[in-house]
């Protein structure tokens, strides 16, 4: 499998060969920036004066964060294109515009969102983003509905499951998220001072046994086409009133607003930030709770940072509340769509049971995401950029909260609770664990 890698020097030539992109960029008047700071791919922002511009993302044939010694099939770009195609129909307002996929170069062309801000960067600067969590929950719900038994006739669903394999990247998630962090592994790393907490985690058979059931679900339950890596670095945000180009959001990227310049958190009920979910290259047919779970876990990680920083209390409170709001947005959107399901033999009682089960799964996957970002190979800047003493305090509190994210430990596995109570119980545990380190 050999294909030419894109560089700032050969992009103009490449774009000349892609006439369907010439409404967005003019290859003869091109400015190119390589912005890929992720773990896997090359990403270029291509702009021409007076035009919307484009983002070109090319899959590398290896894991970028490790190097060519960890080869990785670029076929994942085909999976990403599939997800964007579905999302462009199911939830167009919450994803970037998708201009198309070049299977010869494993390159995707998507909307230029360079005037938007990565949610993780905003949160790291201490700025809450009310509305972003609603966007993430709504995105996850619309994708679940459109790609599961709810929105697809069963024959079509069976075919979709067969054609949506994303073998290499599911292998990464299986190892890095659901296996390695829960035992000693050479790819794990953490501060020496955290060793007692990690040993406790690894010795906690009630918890690691539950994680095995989540891994089993991950391997066997092909329920919906999920994003598969819905963390706060996979969501772009901008102020809701900033229009389609430029405006206040254009000032946000480089050293954008801080908690001070952004002002206080908005009043309850206001949603001044709008979101777009990107980077669905880890998408696969899996359990419906995976995406909300990962996102909720990342809000908890951001709360860990906020708890040891400044301005701690308001931001922690918003992040903890946002964990529940992500779920309630997901649930509300599915309830709204439920009357339009394709197979009405699934009754309303089934939905109730399904939502409750999924809310427990959400908490479970949130816990795994928290643990893997602290113990496993792929870390997050939220915690990694803290000085060691605060980092260890936040990490220990978060590991302790994650270990409580099993059905039995949250609410005794009770069947007679509202699904939102399940998630708000986990949020409350994160808040109270972090309350002690602030
Ligand atoms: C080797 S890839 C490491 C991580 O980066 C991606 O964003 C996923 O989160 C993956 O687990
Ligand atoms: Mg990514």
Image (cartoon, grey):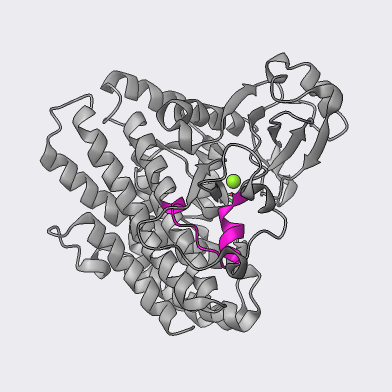
Left of 274 or right of it: where is 156? Answer: left
Check residue 11 for magenta coloring. Answer: no
The magenta segment is 117-133
- Total labels drawn: 0
Query: Residue 95 versus residue 210: which sits nearer the camera?
Result: 95
Rendering coords of residue 288 (x, y %): 34, 43
Whether residue 222 appears in this view of the structure is no
Q: Quadrant of residue 255?
A: bottom right
Rendering coords of residue 264 (x, y %): 50, 68
Left of 27 or right of it: where is 179? Answer: left
Rendering coords of residue 419 (x, y %): 23, 55
Q: Is residue 114 above or below residue 154?
A: below
Check residue 125 for magenta coloring. Answer: yes
Q: Is residue 346 above or below residue 26?
A: below
The residue drawn where x is 42% and y is 58% is 296
The residue drawn where x is 14% and y is 58% is 415
Query: Residue 267 versus residue 135: which sits nearer the camera?
Result: 267
Rendering coords of residue 103 (x, y %): 65, 21
The residue drawn where x is 59% and y is 65% is 124
Q: Quadrant of residue 254?
A: bottom right
The residue drawn where x is 44% and y is 52% is 131
Quadrant (top left, top right, bottom left, bottom right) of the N terminus? top right
Quick one: which residue is furthest to the right in this view? 9
């Amino acid at each position: 499998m050999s294909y030419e890698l894109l560089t700032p020097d050969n992009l103009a030539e490449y774009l000349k060969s892609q006439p369907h992109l010439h409404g967005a960029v003019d290859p003869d008047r091109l400015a190119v920036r390589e912005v890929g700071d992720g773990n896997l791919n090359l990403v270029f922002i291509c702009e021409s004066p007076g035009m919307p511009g484009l983002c070109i993302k090319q899959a590398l044939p290896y894991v970028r964060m490790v190097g060519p010694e960890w080869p990785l099939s670029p076929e994942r770009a085909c999976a990403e294109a599939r997800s964007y195609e579905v999302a462009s129909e199911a939830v167009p307002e919450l994803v970037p515009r998708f201009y198309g996929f070049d299977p010869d170069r494993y390159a995707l062309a998507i909307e230029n969102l360079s005037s938007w801000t990565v949610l993780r960067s905003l949160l790291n600067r201490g700025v809450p983003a009310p509305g972003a969590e609603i966007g993430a929950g709504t995105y996850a719900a619309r994708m679940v509905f459109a790609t599961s038994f709810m929105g697809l006739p069963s024959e079509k669903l069976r075919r979709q499951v067969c054609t949506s394999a994303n073998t290499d990247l599911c292998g990464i998630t299986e190892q890095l998220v659901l296996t390695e962090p829960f035992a000693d592994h050479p790819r794990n790393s953490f501060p020496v001072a955290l060793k007692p907490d990690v040993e406790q985690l690894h010795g906690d058979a009630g918890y690691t046994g539950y994680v095995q059931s989540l891994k089993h679900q991950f391997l066997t339950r092909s329920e919906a086409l999920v994003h598969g890596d819905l963390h706060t670095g996979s969501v772009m945000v901008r102020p809701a009133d900033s229009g389609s180009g430029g405006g206040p959001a254009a000032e946000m990227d480089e050293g954008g607003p801080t908690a001070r310049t952004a002002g206080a958190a908005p009043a309850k009920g206001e949603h001044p930030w709008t979101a777009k979910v990107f980077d669905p290259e880890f998408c696969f047919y899996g359990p419906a709770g995976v995406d909300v779970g990962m996102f909720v876990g990342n809000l908890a990680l951001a709360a860990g940072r906020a708890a040891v920083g400044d301005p701690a209390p308001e931001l922690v409170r918003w992040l903890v509340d946002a964990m529940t709001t992500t779920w309630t947005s997901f649930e509300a959107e599915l309830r709204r769509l439920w009357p339009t399901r394709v197979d009405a033999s699934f009754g309303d009682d089934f939905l109730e049971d399904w939502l409750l089960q999924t809310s427990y799964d959400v908490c479970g996957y949130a816990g795994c995401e928290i643990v893997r970002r602290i113990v496993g190979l792929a870390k997050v800047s939220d915690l990694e950029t803290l000085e060691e003493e605060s980092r260890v305090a936040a990490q220990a509190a978060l590991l302790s909260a994650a270990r409580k994210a099993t059905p039995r430990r949250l609410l005794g596995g009770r069947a007679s609770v509202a699904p939102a109570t399940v998630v708000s119980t986990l949020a409350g545990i994160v808040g109270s664990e972090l309350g002690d380190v602030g």
